[in-house]
Image (cartoon, rainbow, N blue to C red):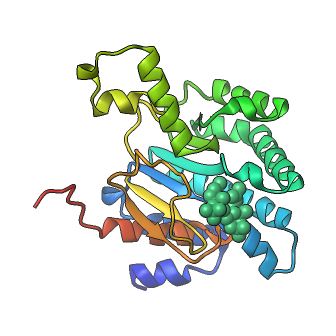
Amino acid sequence: MSRFSRLLFGNRSKKSSDDSVYGSVDKRRLPVHVAVIMDGNGRWAKAKGLPRSAGHRAGVERVRTIIRMSSDIGIKYLTLYAFSTENWKRPKAEVSTLMRLLLEYLRDELSELNEKNVRIKTLGDMSRLPKEVAAEVARATFATKDNTGLTVNMAINYGARQEIVGAVKRAVSEAVDTGEIDEQYVSSLLYTAGQPDPDLMIRTSGEKRLSNYLLYQLAYAEFYFTDTHWPDFDEKQFAIALDDFAKRDRRFGGA
Ligand code: IPE
Ligand code: IPE
Ligand code: MG
């Protein structure tokens, strides 16, 4: 079986399929930082005649899958867009579902995240989250802060423009001399301070836009778009995206 057909068709049993998919990833050309726009939960549910909430619930399972796989194959940073500053426009009931799922996820997953040495960080303005959600997020962040494996950035109430506005405000309040403002300084004012920029940005479900995601940090990222909806984005799909990335020729403006 070729590496590609193995990727596409996998093996029979679930366990050995995971093993073969993991094994098929080229570890020498792995992105250090992967950023994901987890999109398409609603359309996935609609296609099955289910409520949107069922799509979000199924989406949480893929969060588990992709975190587990990222950690196992040695990706260092994984950034997941969970809730944008624009997502508050959704019906109240949907916003509550998303917030509840986030809370339950962090509560149920904390011990496994710790076992896997995963560090949870957040990108976004946590002050607008419901109190219990903000508390759970703070608990997960604190409980995993010394872990040294995969860093998972959860972008919650995140918007890149809001992030940049915040950075400008801080620069002005720190009253830095304009001569001291360089790219490194600007990076240090973003939520991702101290982290390498994403190498690969994946968006599921066919939309080809950034939706206010990591505008500064994605300057030289490779983009991967797939029609697969997030709840169907499994290990095999992730391996295909990584394989696609491995073949890219990144020039960064050079010849
Ligand atoms: C992604 O799925 C989840 C969030 C944005 C929180 P959507 O809910 O956007 O699903 P579609 O795009 O409506 O199908
Ligand atoms: C982007 O998806 C935000 C998240 C995945 C959390 P949206 O579904 O909100 O984006 P648009 O509205 O299609 O641009
Ligand atoms: Mg969407």
Q: Position of residue 21 (x, y in %)?
A: 51, 69
Looking at the image, which residue is at 55% across and 72% down? 236
Q: Nearer the viewer, residue 25 or 95?
A: 95
Q: Where's ligand 3: which quadrant?
A: bottom right
Q: Quarter of the image for the C terminus: give it.
A: bottom left
Looking at the image, which residue is at 59% across and 40% down? 116
Q: Is residue 191 visible?
A: no
Q: Nearer the viewer, residue 171 or 199?
A: 171
Looking at the image, which residue is at 52% across and 66% down? 238
Vertical relation: 244 (above or below) 167: below
Vertical relation: 41 (above or below) 126: below
Q: Position of residue 219 (x, y in %)?
A: 35, 51
Q: Nearer the viewer, residue 59 or 187?
A: 187
Q: Position of residue 33 (x, y in %)?
A: 42, 48
Count of numbered tags? 0
Q: Given the current orientation, which residue lies at the most extreme left position?
A: 255
Q: Taking 205 as reference, is 108 left or right?
A: right
Q: Nearer the viewer, residue 49 or 25?
A: 49
Vertical relation: 59 (above or below) 120: below
Q: Is residue 255 visible?
A: yes
Report which quarter residue 90 is drawn in.
bottom right
Q: Position of residue 115 (x, y in %)?
A: 64, 37
Q: Quarter of the image for the N terminus: give it.
A: bottom left
Looking at the image, which residue is at 73% across and 74% down? 43
